[in-house]
């Protein structure tokens, strides 16, 4: 079958796949395995759906990669890009020059990020987190405390894939390739009650475990000596780590610990920012007041690359008043087309009332629908925050027993999802959804119907294989 949705010469799926594996090294991919199988070719999107080159409609419950928050095919974003491309497709911001879209976006972001007046732009979340490292170290230099170098992060965190961002992240498989982490970055345990259910969390209430997990930050600060610690970085809800929603007690305690020891707090809002949790920022949902916030993805709904760091006044004022030149930046810092698309995207989020809708309507609706999975024979638990959710698979929900990792049950479930026209992500044995914020209640019901079917098929396969 020939796909005629794509510009250029129409090609069959097989032809796309052959050219793909001949030339395109995909990110986070076993290239040999992909070449043997052939990539799924996505050719078109509309609303919460994408279509592949075989004409299958797929409900995109992952918003592309946690980013297409306003859904596919929004003319306002397309028009904004085209208009800006025709007016001024690029100009730099290095040499005492600026462009109207970058100025307007910076001003606009200051309006939606309480307590923040300044922003540093990048093109991705990884670059923004690299910026964070340089910013906080520069801040402490300027403060006359150059020994404050260490940044504390968490195991199983995801902060990006550059050398520095991957070091901030806490993914062992990433650290194993290329000798990471870089010096000056240390990790503490995550506030993941399921992962700690047979250890630190045993016998504790969720709230008590939240306080305990926060105390690990203070233990680490004291172990290192607070005079050596520059910052703590964390995602409000760990996303790529498996949608790990901390107890309500966690973030307020982290905030108090950072304040007590003068440590800067960086909230990585790359996934949680722009409405995903039902507020503009995840830190608002969880009650922290970060000094810096990383953003990317949802700022443009993924239509074009853009990221950056919201820089709070504590840091910004030191940089501005004592600074001299900050030797850091990217060709595309403040890219006018990306900024124009971001402005149109923020307008649309406001016009559609998406943040409030997630908080008051679709988020609670998703939580209710998820709760109906609790008694499914392979569901050990469900968790959600706004429109991000996880379904924990378990061989024996009553005891919380895990599947044998060799059976890769998450991948089995993901295959059944694809077969039913649903994109759901597997993080180990946790199945993840984070649908576009434009999703309606009816579409959530449709999504949950597909999720249930995939879980049923997974259970049947597990039973037939003798894994349960
Ligand atoms: N931080 C978080 C919390 C993320 O989820 C991601 C991407 N998934 C990043 C940083 C890195 O962003 P990018 O892929 O745009 O570099």
Image (cartoon, helix red, strand yellow):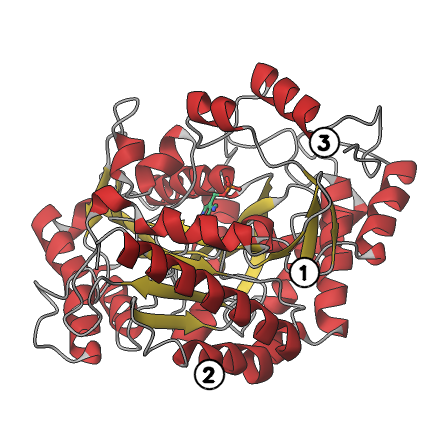
Is 267 on the left-hand or right-hand side of 112?
A: left
Label 3: few (<14), some (14–19) or many (≥20) C-alpha neighbours in 10 Å: some
Q: Is residue 291 visible?
A: no
- Front of the two marks 2 and 3: 2
- Front of the two marks 1 and 3: 1
Q: Is residue 126 visible?
A: yes
Residue 48: numbered disc:
1
Is 431 on the left-hand or right-hand side of 178?
A: right
Marks 2 and 1, how far apart at CA: 20 Å
- Secondary structure under tag 2 reads helix
- Secondary structure under tag 1 reads loop
Marks 2 and 3, how far apart at CA: 48 Å
Picture quarter containing residue 49?
A: bottom right
On screen, residue 219 above or below 171? below
Q: Position of residue 461 (x, y in %)?
A: 34, 54
Image point (40%, 80%), residue name: 371
Picture quarter containing residue 44?
A: top right
Image point (52%, 71%), residue name: 448
Residue closer to the observer: 142 or 188: 188
Label 3 sits on residue: 92
Which callout, 2 or 3, points at the residue further toward the start of the chain? 3
- Secondary structure under tag 3 reads loop
Image point (14%, 66%), residue name: 197
Residue 368: numbered disc:
2
| Callout 2–callout 1 Cβ contact below 8 Å | no
Is 299 on the left-hand or right-hand side of 285?
A: right
Residue closer to the observer: 432 or 408: 408
Residue closer to the observer: 36 or 366: 36
Quarter of the image with the N terminus in it: top right
On screen, residue 205 above or below 273? below
């Amino acid at each position: 079958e020939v796909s005629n949705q794509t510009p250029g010469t129409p090609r069959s799926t097989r032809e796309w796949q052959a050219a793909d594996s001949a030339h395109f090294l995909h990110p986070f991919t076993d290239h040999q395995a992909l070449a043997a199988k052939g990539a799924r070719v996505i050719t078109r999107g509309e609303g919460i759906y994408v279509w592949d080159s075989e004409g299958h409609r797929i409900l995109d419950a992952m918003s592309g990669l946690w980013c297409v928050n306003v859904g596919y095919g929004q003319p306002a974003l397309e028009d904004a890009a085209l208009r800006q491309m025709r007016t001024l497709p690029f100009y730099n911001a290095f040499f005492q020059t600026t462009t109207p879209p970058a100025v307007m976006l910076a001003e606009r972001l200051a309006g939606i990020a309480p307590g923040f007046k300044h922003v540093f732009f990048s093109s991705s979340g990884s670059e923004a987190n690299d910026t964070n490292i340089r910013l906080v170290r520069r801040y402490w230099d300027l403060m006359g405390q150059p020994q404050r170098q260490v940044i504390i992060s968490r195991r199983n965190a995801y902060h990006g894939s550059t050398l520095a961002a991957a070091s901030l992240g806490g993914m062992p498989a990433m650290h194993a390739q290329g000798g990471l982490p870089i010096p000056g970055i240390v990790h503490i345990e995550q506030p993941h009650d399921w992962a700690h259910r047979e250890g630190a969390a045993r016998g504790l209430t969720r709230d008590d475990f939240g306080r305990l997990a926060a105390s690990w930050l203070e233990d680490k600060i004291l172990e290192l000596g607070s005079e050596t610690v520059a910052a703590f970085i964390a995602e409000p809800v760990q996303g790529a780590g498996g949608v790990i929603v901390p107890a309500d007690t966690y973030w307020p305690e982290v905030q108090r610990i950072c304040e007590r020891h003068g440590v800067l707090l960086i909230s990585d809002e790359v996934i949680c920012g722009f409405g995903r949790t039902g507020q503009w920022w995840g830190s608002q949902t969880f009650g922290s007041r970060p000094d810096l916030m990383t953003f990317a993805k949802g700022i443009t709904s993924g239509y074009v690359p853009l990221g950056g760091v919201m820089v709070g006044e504590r840091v910004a004022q030191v940089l501005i008043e004592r600074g001299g030149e900050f030797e850091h930046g990217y060709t595309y810092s403040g890219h006018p087309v990306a900024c124009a698309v971001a402005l149109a995207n923020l307008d649309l989020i406001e016009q559609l009332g998406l943040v409030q809708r997630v908080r008051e309507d679709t988020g609670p609706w998703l939580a209710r629908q998820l709760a109906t999975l609790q008694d499914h024979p392979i569901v050990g638990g469900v968790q959600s925050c706004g429109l991000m959710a996880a379904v924990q698979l378990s061989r024996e929900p009553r005891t919380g027993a895990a599947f044998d990792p060799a059976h890769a049950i998450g991948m089995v479930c993901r295959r059944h999802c694809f077969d039913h026209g649903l994109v759901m992500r597997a993080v180990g044995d946790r199945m993840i959804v984070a649908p576009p914020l434009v999703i309606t209640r009816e579409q959530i019901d449709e999504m949950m119907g597909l999720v249930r079917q995939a879980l049923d098929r997974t259970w049947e396969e597990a039973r037939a294989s003798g894994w349960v």
